[in-house]
Amino acid sequence: MQVANCKLEKRVIFTGFVDYKELYKYLNIADVFCRPSLSEGLGNVFLESMVAQVPVIATEVGGIPDFLKDKETGLFCEVNNPQSIAEKVELLAEDSELKNRVVENGYKMVINNYSWESVSEKMGNLFRKV
């Protein structure tokens, strides 16, 4: 209803369930990924968005601050505050330097810290210590 009222039907897509195999297609056409969680563990979808080079907006809860650094690898919005989300989306739309920086830093962070090679190496090192 809001999308129609704002005449955004060509810019907003409500997909419903998307099979994991199709996820990358949607990330490729996204301008921003926003998940204003109330609680969260690691949240693979944030990392998937970063590696797809989509800027991420998230709340500073649970495990999210372990990988998202405000204005470095993404942007933090406030919990239960839609206005805060809108402000962050607007900031990314207006500040291409900031957007490019968080996209580049997010991508590098995922490749360096969360690739299968990196994670398996860390796990191997951990097991060798035990």
Image: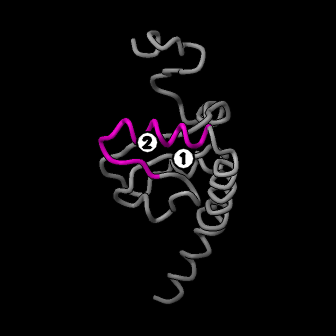
Q: Where is residue 15 in the image (x, y as percent from the top left)?
A: 50, 22
Magenta span includes 117: no
Is 86 a magenta residue?
A: yes
Q: Which residue is drawn at 63% across and 39% down?
A: 94
Q: Mark 2 points at which residue?
A: 35
Q: Residue at x 36, y 53 (%)?
A: 40
- Residue at numbered disc 1: 56
Left/right placement of residue 52 relative to residue 64 reads right
Tell me the quadrant of the picture where the N terminus can be found.
top left
Q: Which amino acid does label 2 sit on?
A: Arg
Location of the C terminus by quadrant is: bottom left
Color theme of the render:
one colour
Name of the residue lying farthest toward the front: 94
Q: What element carries label 2?
A: strand
Q: Which residue is drawn at 51% across and 82% down?
A: 126
What distance separates the C-alpha of mark 1 from that of mark 2?
A: 8 Å
x, y percent for residue 88: 50, 43
Above or below: residue 3 compared with residue 84: above
In the image, which residues are magenta? 76-93
Among the 4 quarters of the image, the one containing residue 54 = top right
Q: What element carries label 1?
A: strand
Q: Where is residue 10 in the image (x, y as percent from the top left)?
A: 60, 14
Given the image, on which type of amino acid does mark 1 rest? Val
Pointer 1 with pointer 2, Cβ within 8 A: yes
